[in-house]
């Protein structure tokens, strides 16, 4: 698997465990294609691996490049004007979407 989003855990080989949670989320992604998946909330205590799971899910889905476009956005823990938040969010979505589409074109050649 190619790493498209730098994972906070550092070396991707350090991602261990969470096989059941990741399998559930990958199955959920498959359901998105058939419009059978509903929105999900990932809720857990601080420092329990939520970010690691979501970043790994992003990389897997991005690498598969199969009808589902992953978008990862992390809300910063600082005071931020709504205009700056909107600009940052919009640019993140555009950059990730563009990268996904360029990768799809590259793979189709």
Image (spheres, rainbow, N blue to C red):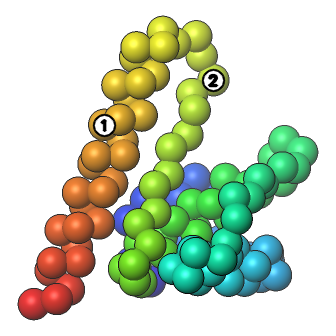
| Side of 76 where 28 appears, left or right | right
Instruction: Name the residue beneath numbered marker 2.
Output: 77
Q: Where residue 92 appears, x then y in whole percent?
A: 36, 42
Q: Where residue 80 appears, x then y in whole percent?
A: 52, 12
Q: Quadrant of residue 104?
A: bottom left
Near mark 2 (Cα within 10 A), the count class, few <14, some 14-19 or many ≥20, is: few
Residue 11 can be seen, yes or no: no
- Residue at left offset 29%, top offset 66%: 100
Residues at circles 1 and 2 in contact by the CB criterion of under 8 Å = no
Disc nearest the viewer among 1 and 2: 1
Residue 60 in the image: above or below residue 51: below
Residue furthest front as drawn: 35
Q: How many marks?
A: 2
Residue 72 can be seen, yes or no: yes
Q: Nearer the viewer, residue 94 or 32?
A: 32
Q: Nearer the viewer, residue 29 or 63?
A: 29
- Residue at left offset 27%, top offset 48%: 95
| Side of 28 where 69 appears, left or right | left
Q: CA distance from mark 1 to mark 2?
A: 18 Å
- Residue at left offset 51%, top offset 80%: 33
| Side of 1 where 102 appears, left or right | left
Q: Quadrant of residue 31?
A: bottom right
Residue 22 in the image: above or below residue 79: below
- Residue at left offset 18%, top offset 68%: 102
- Secondary structure at badge 2 equals loop
* The label number, if any, that marks residue 91 in the structure image: 1
Q: Where residue 66 appears, x then y in whole percent?
A: 40, 83
- Secondary structure at badge 1 equals helix
């Amino acid at each position: 698997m190619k790493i498209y989003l730098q994972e906070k855990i550092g070396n991707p080989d350090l991602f261990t465990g969470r096989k059941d949670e990741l399998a559930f989320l990958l199955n959920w992604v498959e359901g998105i294609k058939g419009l059978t998946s509903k929105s999900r909330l990932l809720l857990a205590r601080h420092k329990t691996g939520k970010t690691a799971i979501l970043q790994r899910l992003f990389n897997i889905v991005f690498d598969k490049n199969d009808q589902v476009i992953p978008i990862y956005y992390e809300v910063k823990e600082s005071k931020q004007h709504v205009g700056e938040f909107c600009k940052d969010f919009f640019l993140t979505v555009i950059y990730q979407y563009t990268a996904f589409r360029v990768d799809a074109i590259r793979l189709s050649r």
